[in-house]
């Protein structure tokens, strides 16, 4: 069962659209984070509080408004938008991404999905970072994770380009996309007056702003996702070039086969097969001693001669064989 699941995931990641790939990465990171949490809890004791080692690992991939944290861990600018700690946080984000991301991909192309996802996440982080450093939102160091900023950027962009796109919602019926986008924006604006997740709210607003900017400039002929797309392509090409063998690297030659501890070259009789002697010159002295060979050597000679005939058929065809070679091949095929 696990192998079947793994094959499905690998196939979808290799051949599926970008939305499905992003969802797979988010789910994989979620599982990895929670597996680390479970393992550390078992090591330090289930009854004890969450061990500090887990927070160190979590903060290694989470974003923060702290300058020192961001400067010493610049990768968190990207990794934080693929990290979810709670199950329902992941579930709702991935559902929104699946619903609205597919609309965006169908309208504007699959190639723009990941670049806008990254731009939305960066814009959301920037809004959160500035809000915490330019105002007095809270004491101490805060951390931010989740794909919300990225998803809001994709949602808003899809709403701008297809405002009348109809979506059927459970218990609500058919609703046009523009009303969903408007409602989502109003919820975030109202959320600015509430403190429980004020950092997340600023992250969402940053994503909303990026979605509008992307749509505004794209309508005027400027695609903001092009630089990010080029950077992603460069990273992919660099990775493939690193994994590709060097041009100066010689290909490995054929491997020697061994029989009874000796290579085929060592056990092959020195004399050439009869049909090769006839075509290539006089017989060697070794051919006059063929009757005195051991049964093992005679079997090897027979096999080598058969392999040579088969190689000749492969290269030149059956009609290129001499009568002697055809007779030999006939006897070999009827040998039991």
Image (cartoon, rainbow, N blue to C red):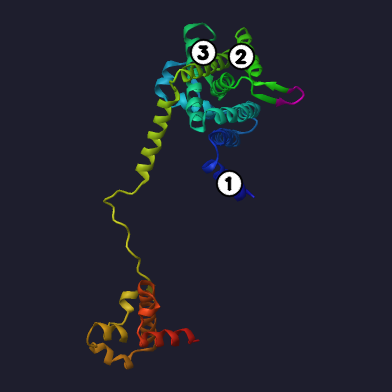
Q: Residue under circle 1?
A: 6
3 or 2: tag closer to the N-terminus? 3
Q: What residue lies at 29% left-to-right and 83% top-to-bottom?
A: 276
> Does residue 49 show up?
no
Magenta-colored stretch includes residue 172: yes
Mark 1 Cα within 10 Å, few/some/many (few <14, many 20+)?
Answer: few
Q: CA distance from mark 3 to mark 2?
A: 29 Å
Task: Give the secondary structure at mark 3.
Answer: loop
Marks 3,1: beta carbons within 8 A:
no
Mark 2 Cα within 10 Å, few/some/many (few <14, many 20+)?
Answer: some
Q: Is residue 92 left or right of residue 249?
A: right
Q: Residue under circle 2?
A: 185
3 or 1: tag closer to the N-terminus? 1
Q: CA distance from mark 3 to mark 1?
A: 42 Å
Q: Is residue 265 left or right of residue 61?
A: left
Q: What residue lies at 64% left-to-right and 23% top-to-bottom?
A: 165
Residue 226 locus on image (x, y percent): 42, 26
Between marks 3 and 2 in the image, the one whose residue lies nearer the viewer:
2
Q: Residue under circle 3?
A: 140
Mark 3 Cα within 10 Å, few/some/many (few <14, many 20+)?
Answer: few
Between marks 3 and 1 in the image, the one whose residue lies nearer the viewer:
1
Marks 3,2: beta carbons within 8 A:
no
Q: Quadrant of residue 314?
A: bottom left
Residue 153 locus on image (x, y percent): 54, 21
Residue 191 locus on image (x, y percent): 62, 11
Task: Give the secondary structure at mark 1.
Answer: helix
Q: Is residue 248 left or right of residue 17?
A: left
Magenta segment range?
A: 168-173
Disc assigned to residue 95: none
């Amino acid at each position: 069962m696990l192998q079947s699941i793994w094959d499905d995931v690998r196939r979808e990641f290799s051949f599926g659209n970008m939305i499905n790939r992003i969802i797979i990465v988010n789910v994989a990171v979620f599982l990895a984070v929670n597996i680390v949490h479970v393992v550390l809890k078992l090591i330090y004791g289930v009854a004890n509080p969450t061990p500090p080692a887990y927070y160190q690992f979590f903060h290694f991939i989470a974003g923060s408004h702290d300058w020192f944290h961001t400067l010493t861990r610049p990768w968190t600018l990207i990794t934080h938008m693929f990290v979810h700690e709670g199950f329902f946080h992941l579930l709702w984000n991935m559902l929104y991404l699946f619903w609205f991301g597919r609309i965006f991909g169908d309208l504007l192309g699959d190639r723009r999905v990941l670049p806008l996802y990254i731009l939305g996440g960066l814009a959301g982080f920037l809004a959160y970072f500035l809000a915490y450093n330019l105002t007095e939102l809270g004491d101490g160091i805060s951390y931010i994770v989740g794909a919300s900023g990225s998803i809001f950027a994709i949602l808003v962009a899809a709403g701008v380009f297809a405002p009348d796109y109809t979506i059927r919602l459970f218990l609500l019926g058919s609703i046009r996309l523009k009303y969903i986008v408007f409602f989502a924006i109003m919820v975030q604006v109202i959320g600015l007056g509430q403190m429980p997740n004020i950092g997340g709210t600023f992250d969402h607003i940053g994503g909303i702003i990026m979605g509008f900017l992307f749509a505004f400039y794209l309508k005027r002929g400027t695609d903001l996702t092009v630089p990010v797309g080029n950077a992603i392509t460069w990273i992919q090409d660099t990775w493939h070039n690193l994994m590709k063998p060097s041009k100066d690297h010689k290909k490995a030659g054929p491997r020697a086969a061994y029989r009874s501890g000796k290579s085929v070259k060592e056990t092959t009789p020195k004399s050439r097969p009869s049909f090769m002697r006839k075509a290539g010159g006089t017989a060697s002295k070794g051919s006059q001693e063929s009757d005195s060979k051991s049964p093992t050597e005679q079997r090897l000679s027979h096999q080598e001669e058969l392999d040579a005939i088969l190689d000749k058929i492969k290269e030149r065809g059956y009609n290129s064989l001499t009568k002697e070679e055809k007779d030999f091949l006939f006897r070999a095929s009827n040998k039991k």
